[in-house]
Image (cartoon, rainbow, N blue to C red):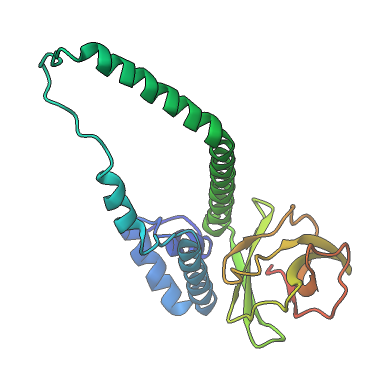
Amino acid sequence: MSTVDLHTLTGAYALHALSEEERGEFERHAADCEACAQEALELSETAARLGLATTMTPSAALKSRVMRQITTVRQEGPRGTSPLRSPGGNRARRLSRWALAACLAGVAAFGGTAVWQYDRAEDAQQRAQQAERSTDAIAAVLAAPDARTRTAELADGGRGTVVVSKSRDRAVFIASDIASPPEGKVYQLWFDDGGTMRSAGLMDPGRTARPVLLEGAVGGASGMGITVEPAGGSTQPTSSPLALMTFPA
């Protein structure tokens, strides 16, 4: 029999991080522990949404674009053969110089476009790296042995779940069935520091179902709230909260 407190294994169970023996032991425990069963279910739902949020579906035109580009790539010639010589070799070299000059002119003409495309690629790479770091941090909270969840109904009919890890001093929020914010508005998250609301970041208006790592440490916060704010967010809430949630003990 394991000496580990089975109540602390909900996060590891949701992420399939237990051995077969530990998994079976936890499932037998959860059959008689409604709190652990509910918490494991909520963490599993959150982990599933996290996986969906980080996937990317390629465009339908990707295959045809790749196939078109393949036809423009010069095939590699047979290895070990000597270059063909012809009486027109000098003319061929002159043509090569003209071709090189044309290529250089093209580079000069489209240099600005190339720099712009490079900057776009750099920005995309930085965004991808930032998203990866955020995903890792969210997964760490969900997998923490002391991860605890609390779910509440939102004023608009949706539902919000917060996962808190005291050992990591971080919290994750995930909403389901929540409508997109009105035009020019954004959902803003808040820590409740004994009645004083502290900004915990903004939700992506186009991805309201994506798990959000609340910005900043949980600290002494007793709970969190969510409000509708002008685009860019506010320093203090300017609207009635969609929900106020007390953090789980």
Q: x, y (%) of residue 212?
A: 63, 62
Q: In which quarter of the image is the N terminus?
A: bottom left
* Quadrant position of residue 81: top left
Compared across the picture, whether 27 is left or right of 139 comes to: left
Task: Name the spot of residue 164 as percent of width and height, x first.
Answer: 65, 62
Depth order, front residue of 205/155:
205
Which quarter of the picture shows residue 141? bottom right
Examine the image and state in which quarter residue 176 appears. bottom right
* Residue 145, position as x, y percentages in the image: 54, 56
- For the residue pair 124 and 6, the one nearer the viewer reads as 124
Q: In the figure, is residue 190 to the left or right of 125?
A: right
User: In the rendered image, which quarter contains the C terminus?
Assistant: bottom right
Which residue is nearer to you in this view: 31 or 61?
61
Can I make out residue 6 in this image?
A: no
Residue at image coords 88%, 62%: 235
Residue drawn at 49 percent across, 70 percent down: 40
Eyeballing the image, is 170 above or below 100?
below
Name the residue nearer the viewer: 244 or 95.
Answer: 95
Q: Where is residue 80 in the image (x, y as percent from the top left)?
A: 10, 16
In this rendering, position of residue 2 left or right of residue 185: left
Residue 196 visible in this rendered orientation of the protein: yes
